[in-house]
Amino acid sequence: MPPLLILAAIGVGVYMGVKWANSKKTVSRKTTRPKAGKASKSKAHAADAANLKQDPVSGVYRVDE
C-alpha cells in the first residue's frame, strides 16, 4: 500500500507542476508589449485609405487617381 501512496503523491506533484508552469506562460504572454511595427503599419494603412473613393453605381471603394 505505501508504494501506491508514493506513486499517487508523485503524480499529483507532476500534475501541479505542469499546471503551475502553464499558468506562468499565460501570464507572460499577456504582459508582453505590442510590437512597434504595428503602429507604423496602421499609419500606412490609414494613408492608403485616404486615397479611396466610393463608386456610386457599384458601392465599391476604388483608388482615387
Image (cartoon, rainbow, N blue to C red):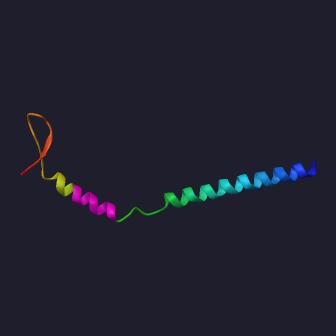
Q: Is residue 54 magenta?
A: no
The image shows a total of numbered marks equal to 0
Magenta region, mostly helix, strand or loop?
A: helix
Q: Position of residue 7 (x, y in %)?
A: 84, 52
Residue 8 located left or right of residue 16: right
- Residue ID at (77%, 51%): 12
- Residue ID at (88%, 49%): 4
- In this orientation, which residue lies closer to the viewer: 43 or 58? 58
Q: Give the farthest residue toward the left.
A: 65
Q: Give the farthest residue toward the bottom.
A: 36
Give the vertical position of 36 relative to 51 (above or below): below
Give the vertical position of 2 relative to 38 (above or below): above
Give the vertical position of 14 relative to 57 (above or below): below
Q: Position of residue 61 (x, y in %)?
A: 15, 43
Q: Position of residue 50 (x, y in %)?
A: 15, 53
- Residue ID at (27%, 57%): 42
Task: Choose top left, top right, bottom left or bottom right for residue 24.
Answer: bottom right
Q: Position of residue 10 (x, y in %)?
A: 80, 55
Residue 12 located left or right of residue 62: right
Q: Is residue 42 magenta?
A: yes
Q: Bounds of the magenta span?
A: 37-45
- Residue ID at (49%, 61%): 31
